[in-house]
Amino acid sequence: MDKSIESQTVLNVEDIKKLLPHRAPFLFIQKLTDIGPGESAVGYKTVSFNEPHFQGHFPDYPVMPGVLIVEAMAQTAGALVMYTLGLGSANRIVYFLTIDKARFRRPVRPGDVLRMPVKALRKRGPVWRFTGEAYAGDVLCAEAEYSAMIADRVQEGDAGTSDGNR
C-alpha cells in the first residue's frame, strides 16, 4: 500500500482510490473518517443532482436508488478492510457476497450528505461481515448487514474463468 496513507485517521477520495478499484461514476464515497482498523469507520458521500442515475430515477423527483446507498455503505466497509490489511486496489478486488436486513427509511435526494458508519461484525478468512447505516443529517435513511470477500483480481484470460467474470 502507498506509504502516504498508512496510519491516517481521515482518508480523502484520492486515498480511497488507492484502496478500491471503483471509479466515477461508480465510486460512491469521498471521505473516510473515524477509522478503527479492523473494526469501524465512517464514510461520506455528497449527493449531487448531476449523478447519472438521477436522469431516470426520477427526472421530476430525483431519489438515489436504495441499492446505490447500500453500495456506498459496502464501499465504506471495503475501504476499511483494504486499509486495515494494508492492501491496494492494484491486484485485489472486493466482491459483494450478501445483503441482509436492508431497510430504507427516507429518500436520499440531491444536496444530501450521506454519513455512513459501518462496523465489522466478523471475519472468517477473506470474508468480512458488516453492519452499516446511512444518515442524511441526523435522519436514518437506510441500514443493512452485508458481507464481502477480498480476492486477487482475475484478469481476462486467466485460468478458472471462461469469460473473465466470477
Image (cartoon, helix red, strand yellow):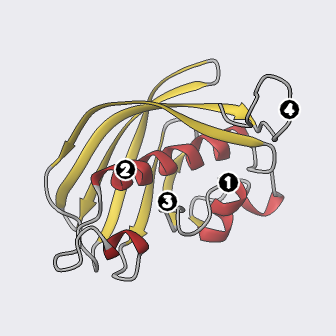
Query: Element type at marker 4?
Result: loop
Instruction: Kindly identify the residue that appears in the image at 33 percent across and 82 percent down.
Output: 49
| Residue type highlighted by circle 4 | Asp
Query: Element type at marker 3?
Result: strand
| Residue type highlighted by circle 2 | Pro
Give yes or no for contact between labels 4 and 2 (Cβ–Cβ under 8 Å): no
Which comes before the other along the chain, label 4 or label 2? 2
Which comes before the other along the chain, label 2 or label 1? 1
Residue beneath label 3, please?
Answer: 33
The image quarter containing residue 60 is bottom left
Q: Dot 1 surroundings within 10 Å: few (below 14), some, or many (20 or more)?
A: some
Name, please, the residue furthest toward the right: 158
Give yes or no for contact between labels 1 and 3 (Cβ–Cβ under 8 Å): no
Tag of residue 21: 1
Give the vertical position of 142 relative to 103 (above or below): below
Tag of residue 158: 4
